[in-house]
Image (tube, rainbow, N blue to C red):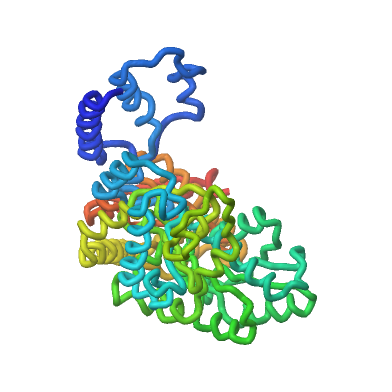
Amino acid sequence: MDIEAFRKAGYQAIDRICDYYYSLEQRSVASQVRPGYLKELIPDNAPEEGEDFQQIADDYQRCIVPGLTHWQHPSFFAYYPTACTFEGILADLYATSATNPGFNWACSPACTELESIVMDWAAKLFGLGDHFLNSAEVGGGVIQTTASDSGLVAIVAARSLYTSKHPEAKLEDMIIYTTTQTHSLGVKAGLVLGLECRALEVMPEDKYALRGETLKRAIQEDVGRGKHPFVLVATVGTTSSGAIDHLGEIGEVAKSYPSLWIHVDAAWAGITLACPEYREVAQLDNINKYADSFCTNFHKWGLVNFDASTLWVRNRKHLTDALDITPEFLRTKEGDAGVVIDYRNWHLALGRRFRSLKIWFVLRSYGAEGFRRHIRQGIELNKHFVSLLRSSSDFSLVTEPSFALSVFRLMPPSIVSTEIDKEKLEATLNDLNKDYYSRLSGRNDIALTQTKMNGTFCIRFAIGAARTKKVHVDHAWQILQEEAQATLSAWGKPEAAT
Ligand SMILES: *Cc1c(COP(=O)(O)O)cnc(C)c1O
């Protein structure tokens, strides 16, 4: 393809992308294809001779689009939002047009310098303390692929720091702390690093948040048996229910155990810190006081297309001590002089994408106020959703709503009042809600996900897609009621209730 052919195909691609967005609401939210569908449409081998690009572009529409689940659909309430904006798409296009692996400052100075500036913009937008700023040259910020990578990088740095201070600690005695509600990234880091991971218990009465006492007991137990807990992955906004660990209590406990690195994973909820009114709930002061590292994802609720996970560390030296490997061919005079950041030493891989461009485009085009409006709108829509749920006695929230996430289940008085054995009732409710959820997941005009919390089967409603409005929440509520009625009347029949 030459430049003029690219120009033509590029215009067509943008036109088709616009058509896609215009048609989004008419599409089925989740893809309806069967496993293996694509093998029937695409040959087993790459073509020997190059093909006409028009045909390739048409095959994208014919073969690929039907197999897409439309996360940008305004009725997408599953998992978590991946709010994507045109500004971000355009930034990706520019970034890829000047593609380079960006591992050193010298690879393309703009890539490193923009990342370092944009990470400071974001830190200030969220109210993070000066010690996290790149400009202060103590801590700093770096864009990782995902929150899982951010967590792994933090844990690698924590391990390095710990073993340098405690050379007697054997790897088999070192422990990563998570909670039973922490994202699986903690367990995965344990798998990758060959380290034990211990999930601390959290309670429904604490809204599934980690308490200081629980941490204290665990440390006493583990240290007592010669173990070395060295990092805690605490969460602001857990994946299941949006729970927020008690960072203040955790920080107090960690004072008498200063070798414990505290990583705060706020992959989904962290961007609410942009709004001053949510900083107390999201524990900004405690993050600034106690977190050794902090992560949030712009690529979830934060209007930036996947991927862009932002990670800040209190002390950049802890990262580079763990990850700096400089063979001769990677040396540069700026790097040797220590006057630039070489981001290859701040993450696991060597090469890296030019992700800061999309954060830059989005923050400039929306402005801090526009960004906050988007967050506030998600939270307002969730309040509206919660008021609808509360208006019906058939539904019950499983835990307090968190920002733009609600976790609920069917709990109709007709069933609750007839079953007095608590255990049996819970089992019945779980079966009922599984039936209900399976009806909901059969719908193509809405997408939701399930979760289980301390044995309770529940349904998550996650708001935050860039184009979701009140009408979509109202429509979702209509569907939820319709399917609830259908589920309950099926259960009303004697053969179904047994
Ligand atoms: C979504 C989520 C993750 C995982 O995010 P990735 O960027 O896909 O790794 C981790 N933790 C929390 C709290 C999340 O909500």
Count of picture labels: 0
Residue 427, image x and y in percent? 59, 58
What residue do we see at 70% from left, 62% from top? Answer: 196
Q: In this view, does 76 lie above or below 182?
A: above
Position of 469 with respect to 141 (left or right) is left
Residue 50, image x and y in percent? 39, 16
Residue 41, image x and y in percent? 43, 19
Residue 176, image x and y in percent? 65, 66
Viewer-closest of 184 and 254: 254
Viewer-closest of 233 and 321: 321
What residue do we see at 48% from left, 54% from top? Answer: 332
Position of 257 with respect to 277 (left or right) is right
Work out which residue is located at the far top of the displayed protein and give it: 49
What residue do we see at 44% from left, 59% from top? Answer: 334
Q: Quadrant of residue 459?
A: bottom left
Q: Is residue 449 above or below residue 127?
A: above
What residue do we see at 61% from left, 70% from top? Answer: 231
Tell me if residue 268 can be seen: yes
Tell me if residue 409 can be seen: no
Viewer-closest of 31 and 232: 232
Q: Is residue 282 above or below residue 459?
A: below
Q: Quadrant of residue 122?
A: bottom left
Quadrant including the N terminus: top left
